[in-house]
Amino acid sequence: MGKLRPEDMDRIAERMQKAMSLRLGAGRVKLTVHMGTCGIAAGARKIMSAIMRCLDESGAADVIVTTSGCAGLCSKEPMMTVELAGQAPVKYVDLTEEKATRIFAEHVVNGKIVADCALAIGSEWTL
């Protein structure tokens, strides 16, 4: 590993601030990309990369991106859960990079659920 540069330290500090915000619940939106073995095999890394690009391009400081293991629906991977403050979580399935980008623009930024990509709202309601 090479020497750390000042800009590396800035990135590390920013990453740690986001991690602390997650612990304190300071985000307006929490995105969870499901990255169990099945999710990774189905393309979850590409979904995560697409979301991180969207986050960087939008400059949103109130969006927390995290990962989880398998959600138990391997045949529906890659999946992502979007949780807006005060609203039930929405589980999106069978994602592509294009769908993830659309979900970020429509649901995360504008608050509109992308029904044709969603499996369920909350833990009991289905679309």
Image: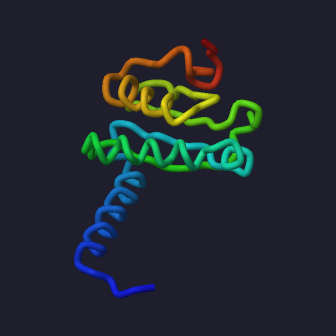
Q: Is residue 29 above or below residue 61?
A: above
Answer left or right for 48 relative to 22: right
x, y percent for residue 114: 48, 18
Q: Is residue 34 above or below residue 119?
A: below
Residue under the point 45% across and 43% down:
50
The colour scheme applied to this rendered structure is: rainbow
> Which of 126 and 48 lies nearest the eye of the viewer?
48
x, y percent for residue 58: 27, 40
x, y percent for residue 67: 55, 50
Answer left or right for 11 relative to 116: left
> Could you say which quadrant of the image residue 33 lies in?
top right
Residue under the point 31% across and 48% down:
56
> Could you say which quadrant of the image residue 11 lies in?
bottom left
x, y percent for residue 4: 32, 83
Residue under the point 56% across and 33% down:
96
Answer left or right for 20 relative to 76: left
Q: Quadrant of the N terminus?
A: bottom left
Residue under the point 53% across and 42% down:
47
Answer left or right for 119 relative to 98: right
Q: Quadrant of the C terminus?
A: top right
